[in-house]
Image (cartoon, grey):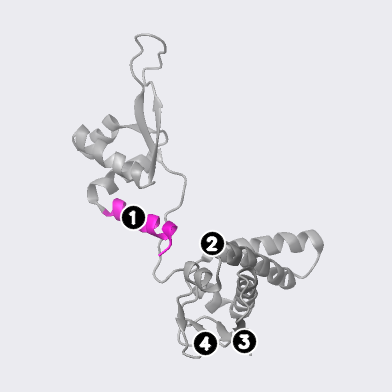
Amino acid sequence: MDESRTDQLSAVAAISDPLRRALFEFVSRSADAVSREDAARATGMARSTAAFHLDRLVDEGVLATEFKRLSGKSGPGAGRPSKLYRRAGGDITVSFPVRRYDLAGDMLAAAVAESDRTGEPVRAVLATISAATGREIGASAGSLDAALESCGYEPRDDGAGGIVLANCPFHKLATNHTDVICHANVALLQGVAEGASETERTVEFVEPANGCCCVRVTAAS
């Protein structure tokens, strides 16, 4: 499991605790960053208990902190700044099996924008952008297998030198818009193979069946 997914799971686990969830919801509803005292009062906890759980949520990346003198005074005698809490800016998204609708959305939006700019048909632009995105993913992962694993395709050895992709990260989109999404997916994974300098196997389109992806990796002839 890649590090970012592990972090997401850890964050979800932190919020699942009833006390931390109550604190998280209070902080999320507040227009301004809140103090430990305010959080404790709102949730009926002791200040020390609230402080412990708030800091745990900070450690997990769910909340962020800032320091501010609540009295509004400055200089000698103004007192120490209070530690305040606010919701962190990142998203927390975990799904089983893995879904990558964010990746699909980025490619589709970029294709529409480029098509508007150039007048080129959006389907052709989407294929180009998907392949370029795949090359970046493949080069970063270092190998085709690592890239497939990190993107959630659940690659499985087919016993003949190839790979079956047991999961489609774009499942709902592919179900509703099969032709568009599957062709973009093929271009994406062909780009991944190119970026990972894969020479012994090729990426091919197959009709999706039994929940598997529309791409199959086969041994090069």
- Residue type for callout 3: Ala
Which quarter shows the C terminus?
A: bottom right
Q: CA distance from mark 4 to mark 2?
A: 31 Å
Residue 152 among those drawn in magenta? no
Kindly identify the amino acid type of the residue bearing the numbered disc 2: Asp
Q: Quadrant of residue 48?
A: top left
Which range is magenta?
1-16
Residue 102 disc label: 2
* Residue 200, position as x, y percentages in the image: 60, 82
CA distance separating discs 3 and 2: 31 Å
User: Mostly what secondary structure, the magenta segment?
Assistant: helix
Q: What numbered label is drawn on residue 178?
A: none
Q: CA separation, marks 3 and 4?
A: 9 Å
Would you name the residue on which mark 3 appears? 220
| Disc 3 to disc 4: CB gap under 8 Å | no
Residue at numbered disc 4: 161
- Residue type at mark 1 is Ser
